[in-house]
Image (spheres, rainbow, N blue to C red):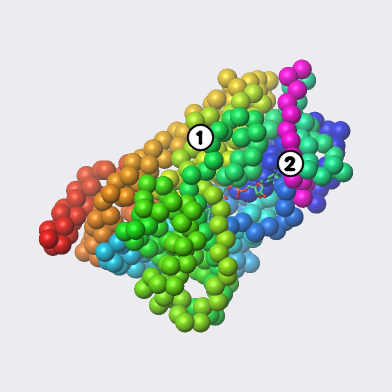
Amino acid sequence: MSKVNSDKIYDAAIVGSGPGGSSTAFYLSKLGRSVVILEKEKLPRRKICGDAISQIAQKHLTKMGVLQEILEEKKGHWAEIGGLISPSRITYIDNSAEVIGSHLMISIKRQIMDEKMVRAAEREGAHLLEEYNVKEVKFSEEDKIWTIVSQDDSKKKIKAKVLVAADGAVSKIARSLGIVDSPPKAVSSSVYIKAGTHQFKEDGVCIYTQDILPGYTALFKEADGDLVFCCYIIPGGRYKTSDLQHVHLSFLSGEPYLSRALGPNAKIEKMNSAPLRLGGVKKSYANHLLIVGDAAGMIDPLTGEGIQYAMDAGEIAANVLDEAFDEDDLSEKFLKRYQKKWMKTFGRDFKWSTRMVKVLAKKPIFIDAFAQLCNDKGPSYMIMWAKIMTGSQSKLSFFKPRLAVPLLLTSLKLSLKKK
Ligand SMILES: Cc1cc2nc3c(=O)[nH]c(=O)nc-3n(C[C@H](O)[C@H](O)[C@H](O)COP(=O)(O)OP(=O)(O)OC[C@H]3O[C@@H](n4cnc5c(N)ncnc54)[C@H](O)[C@@H]3O)c2cc1C
């Protein structure tokens, strides 16, 4: 672990060493700025997640040298065979990797990925302080310096010109400063199923049932043969966040595809859950302050995925801060560029996701139609679906004629068949 000089005034103090904090630290250190990362846990730490890492996130991991390490150590599992099960149980499962010649997703246990990311930031010169649980942050208007205080009085106070809050969905810091003013509105569960105890032959499958929409469940295979199962409760449907345990357990015990995939001897761990702050906050900046990742609600409202957005935002934050240091202007007015840039990169697409959430909650037939289209026309539609859902293509693509027309026609055919 790097030693932290307590008398030093860092350019930036970053709270949280998840993908948001580590990527900000990596990119900012690479630009030559002095950075300290404050993480309340001892690493490696467990992070409740579905561990599904999209192509955009893979690009950041590659820039950091992390994906290469993970592949060398065989700690990532490429999703090749996978697909979806629709509300009317139309199933499409295929090998999309064969068709596109690359992989849209890889499963990596967060415990492994997150530690490697923070080590990559350290290699660029960032200092990491583990088991530093930030209790309080104070900004001196006079000196223009933040003082950061640990829960543990024996730990030294940290001083920095900029504070980056990347402390996750609860956003303790952003909320204490009054920047974020509401609790997260969605929730997801996650459990591991022990390798060797299940019968899952695929790599990743999403299951959409009518009652859980606009949420869904997903089952992915990990490199060590474990499975990870997640159940996402997204507002707008029948279930409330408080129903999570009931929904999670009823899926694991009664959903037919899952029952077959898990088999009678599956060793399933006890349910874990964590909140999801969806759709991006309206303001993620203030004087000498940026909010990154889940803390700023950078989670796609349609999928519950946030790793790639936290990483994108980390890179954007680093670039904006670098310019701000060059200009000697860390004011709210200057740092507003950060909000504009992440909104342009991915935030605007969240608005389309929110619209899609509303449509799917009312018209599950569109997911049936999608699965049917894949069956009728082959994997190119599945790939389109996966690219849109994982943010490689805009959600607007759902509304473009190439997709919207066949989708509408298939929906019409399916609804006539039902009558
Ligand atoms: C069940 C579930 C499944 C998910 N599945 C996926 C998925 O498959 N793919 C995907 O892309 N996204 C998924 N997500 C979302 C994803 O986990 C987040 O978007 C991602 O972790 C955001 O990274 P972050 O760095 O902003 O926050 P986090 O990863 O939450 O990191 C925040 C860090 O801050 C630290 N911290 C918090 N408070 C303090 C403090 N006071 N002092 C010091 N340190 C502090 C925490 O210990 C933590 O290390 C899932 C989320 C959940 C809950």
Residue at point 48% right, 48% down? 186
Q: Is residue 129 magenta?
A: yes
Q: Is mark 1 within 8 Å of ligand 1?
A: no
**On the rendered image, what quadrant is the C terminus found in?**
bottom left
* Residue linked to disc 1: 281
In magenta, the rendered stretch is: 128-142
How dense is the environment of label 1, judged by Cα within 10 Å: few (below 14), some, or many (20 and up)? some
Residue at point 82% right, 45% down? 152
In the image, 336 versus 233, the foreground residue is 233
Residue 215, position in %: x, y?
40, 54
Residue 400, position in %: x, y?
25, 43
Q: Name which residue type carries label 1.
A: Val
How dense is the environment of label 2, judged by Cα within 10 Å: few (below 14), some, or many (20 and up)? many
Instruction: Please tell me whether residue 407 is drawn above or below residue 377 in the rendered image.
Output: above
Location of residue 38 (image quadrant)? top right
Q: Is mark 2 within 8 Å of ligand 1?
A: yes
Q: Whole-Å distance between the Cαs marked 2 and 1?
A: 22 Å
- Decide if residue 104 is on the left or right side of residue 321: left
* Residue linked to disc 2: 134
**Pointer 2 or 1: first along the chain:** 2
Q: Secondary structure at mark 1?
A: loop
Q: Name which residue type carries label 2.
A: Val
Let me know if residue 333 appears in the view.
yes
Q: Is residue 62 magenta?
A: no
In the image, 136 versus 261, the foreground residue is 136
